[in-house]
Amino acid sequence: MVLNSFKNIFFVLILCLTLSGFSQEKQRIRIEYAGIASSNPNINEGAFVFLRDETQQIHFIHEGVNMWCDKAIYYEDQDFIEAFSNVVMKQGDSINMVAKYVEYSGKTQLAFAQGDVILTEPQSTLTTNKLYFDRTRQLAYYNTKGKVVRDSSGTITSQVGRYYMNAKKYQFTKDVVLVNPDYTLKTERLDFFPDNGHAYLFGPSTIDGEDSTVYCERGFYDTNANTGYFQRNAKINYDDRIVEGDSLYFDRDRSFASATNNIKVTDTINNSVVRGHYAEVWKDKDSLFITKRALAITVQEKDSVYLHADTLMVTGKEDNRITRAYYKARLYKSDLAGKADSIHVDHKTGLTKMINLSRFSSDDIFATTRKPVLWNLDNQITGDTIHLLSNVETEKLDSLKVFNNAFLVSKDTISEDAFNQIKGQRLIGLFRDNELYNVDIIKNAETIRFMRNEENELIGIQKSKSGSLNIQIIDQAIEEVRFINQIDGNIYPEDEFPKSGKRLRGFDWRGEERLTSINDLFKDEAPIVLPIIKGLHDYIPPEEFVDDSVTKRIEEAGKTTPNKPNKAARNLPKKTTTVIPVVPEMKPVKSTKEKKAKEGQ
């Protein structure tokens, strides 16, 4: 035993003396603890073989890296080690790797690990079957599927992965899946920073949570704060709403999203669409706020309804939804148009309120501006407040109520300067097939009518006052007028009717304001200037593990033993092929009720 121990010590001493001759060249692998050492020129190309003893493992050191193993073969002429069984490799205080087998070249500083490989750093743990490590670039690489676990972010798997140790950055490509208790993220490429939990998404990507799904083709997600920023065909699916825009912001914990530029919010339950250039969505509050050329479209079977204002707000559950349009609100459908300071729509009851906001009212008793106005066919209706009721099942107009200062005007069919006028304190109108057929004027009713015979010849101008009156309309023309509690009235020949009396007090013909198309909703508005969105960095293809610098180092390593196979050149990864990502279908999100029953480039 004493003799054998003396032989091992003598052998290691000779080996160390041999290696010291190269000390003035590039630093070579140093044997810190040899265990049981042997050498045979006929075995392993004259390599030295080391076996651990009963006290500890074999220990090697090379330029800041320590490696332990149970067995090692050291090729002195190529400064190359093969390490077997329970291999542990440590770089500094933060990087640890274990594997069943490791190869390491002291000349190229390239390492290859295989068999239950586990790489750990303070914030994450990487497991894979094969791992390549370039110490010069501080780059670890796998292409045989790997998994990274980070406590606060979840688990990330991919077919190919890189870890840049200096930047503390992972780069995952091909079939990337991040599984978190609250969501699952899938993408073609993910740049991930374990220190702060920042993730950068490239290519078609989805983040699927319990009550939301995010899709984008370029995005950022903070896995610590649960917030994200998405671009390029970005959309967020919230139960019954789909939010789309050039740029989306997402806050999972607050159930909040905002969108900028070219926004479209689709209500899949109520079959409606809201558009604009800035929007905020509060899911838990069932609230949508949208501005900058805001437009709401309620899609109907035969005729959609368009609502535009400076700002739109949609609130309430899907079965009790309310839309508020305020400041310069405008309403349009093929047989109806209107304007008001504010428009309030209750989708459950079908009640639309057109409101004259008091903050814009004038103290002048003769003022007529800013009052709500409604056009139906040839009729103009104004008043302080207008209520319009629709049948939610048939989607047809049912009735109309005008409160205070009701005024109904229609232009005479022949004369350019003649207007049929009816006014009173209140007005109640009934619709049939979206056409007014009955109108009741209640209290202080006044009329001016241009009476014509069947040949459209003017037979006189009727002017009257009464307590109330009822009007019957057939084929868009007044068929009969009934005066209730008539106070005064007469029919005058045209030449005897005073010109100053052709307008009732409060008359305000606003025909030039009438909306005749969807484009008129935006008439007289200044062109909108959209903000320039500072986009995320464009996609840059991942670098190859074996680049020009690696190739050069391998070639230099082989020059010292030109007649032997260059061990530094073995077990190198093949070049990756570019995968063209296929855009996945956006997974529809089940409702909550159904479910319960610039760091990276």
Image (spheres, helix red, strand yellow):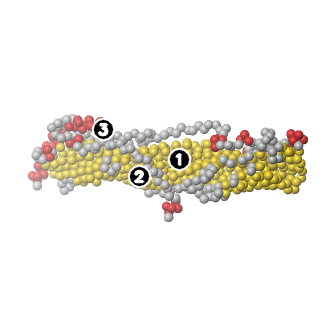
Q: Residue furthest bottom?
A: 597
Q: Check disc 2 and report its element: helix, strand or loop.
A: strand
178 to the left or right of 288: left
- Residue placed under numbered mark 3 in the picture: 547
**Image coords of residue 482 (percent x, y):** 83, 55
Please tell me which residue is depicted at 64% across the width and 45% down the height of the picture: 308
Mark earlier in primary sequence (2, 1): 2
316 to the left or right of 437: left
Quadrant of the image containing the C terminus = top left
Instruction: Give residue 291's mark.
Output: none
Mark-to-mark CA distance, 3 and 1: 40 Å
Mark earlier in primary sequence (3, 1): 1
220 to the left or right of 22: right
- Residue placed under numbered mark 2 in the picture: 178
Quadrant of the image containing the N terminus = bottom left
Foreground pick, 448 / 2: 448
Dividing the picture into quarters, in which one does residue 541 lie? Answer: top left
**Image coords of residue 256 (percent x, y):** 54, 51
